[in-house]
Image: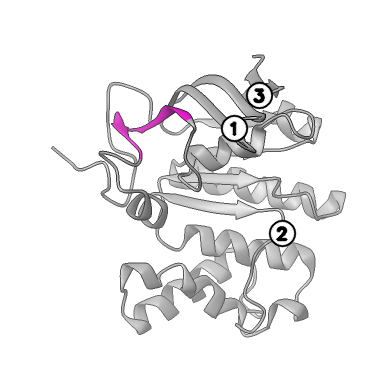
Amino acid sequence: MSSPLNGGSPISTSGPILEARGLVKSYDEGRVEALRGVDLKIDAGEYAAISGPSGSGKSTLLHLLGGLDTATQGQVFFNGSVLGKAVDLDTYRSRQVGFIFQAFYLLPTLRAAENVQVAMLALHEKANHRAERAAALLEEMGLGTRMNHFPNQLSAGERQRVAIARALANDPTLLLADEPTGNLDSVNSAHIMDLLCGIREQRGMTMIVVTHENDIANAAPRHIRIRDGKIES
C-alpha cells in the first residue's frame, strides 16, 4: 500500500483526501475561539473556496488543513491518516502541500529563480535539477525573462506568480491559497485566479482558496461559508 506521504499525484482512497473532525482552535488561554467545532471533507481533485467576514476563522482553518498550525481540539486527516500523528507535519508540508499567501513571502535578497528553488531544499534535490525545475515553472508562469530579477524589481502580479511557481516546486497534491489576490488590482486578480484554476485542472490537484471576494468564492465549484468559527454551508 502506498504511504500517505508519497509525492506526486493524489493517492486513491475510498474517503476524502482531507477531512477535519471537530476542529477547535483557541488563543489567549482559551478566551478567544477562532474555530468552534468544524467538520469538513474535501475530495481529491476538488476546488473549494472558503469565505467569511474578517475574523471568522477562514485562514485559521486553512492553516490547520495545511499543517501550519495544530488544533486545540479535533483532528485533521490526510488520506485517512491523522496529521501530526500518523503523518509527519514537516514531511506533509514539504511534499504534499503548496502554499500561496497574500503577502507573497519572497526572500528579498534572492532572485525569482532562487526563491522558487528554496522550496526544493528540504528534499535535497541536486542543484542542477533545482535550477532546471525553477526555470521551467517560471516559464510556465510567463516569467521566463524575469527569473533573474529580485522581488523589488517585479510587479505585485509578477511576485505572486513567482510565489505560485514556488508552491508548485515539489509537485504537491494540495494547493492552499490564503487571499491570493488580496494585494492585487482587479486585472491581476483575474489573471491569477485564471492561472490557479488552469494549474489545478492540468495537474488534477486539490485546491482550497480562502478569499473575502464574493466573485471569486461564487465562481468556485464549491463555496464554503464560515462565520464566528463555524461553517454555515
Of badges 1 and 3, the one in the foreground is: 1
Which range of residues does the magenta coloring cover? Answer: 73-83
**Is disc 2 in contact with disc 3, using a CB cutoff of under 8 Å?**
no
Amino acid type indicated by mark 3: Gly
Q: Quadrant of residue 77?
A: top left
Residue drawn 29% across and 28% down?
80
| Of callouts 1 and 3, the N-terminal one | 1
**Is disc 2 in contact with disc 1, using a CB cutoff of under 8 Å?**
no
**Label 1: few (<14), some (14–19) or many (≥20) C-alpha neighbours in 10 Å:** some
x and y percent of residue 84 in the render?
Answer: 34, 42
Q: Residue most toward the front? A: 29
**Label 2: few (<14), some (14–19) or many (≥20) C-alpha neighbours in 10 Å:** some
x and y percent of residue 144 in the render?
Answer: 61, 76
Q: Locate residue 93 relative to residue 53 in the image: left or right.
A: left
Disc 3 target residue: 229
Q: Which mark is residue 50?
A: none
Disc 2 target residue: 103
183 and 206: which one is in front? 183
Disc 1 target residue: 26
188 and 210: which one is in front? 210
Q: Residue most toward the left? A: 1
Amino acid type indicated by mark 1: Ser
Res 221 visible: no
Residue drawn 26% across and 41% down?
4
What main secondary structure does the magenta stretch of the protein show?
Answer: strand
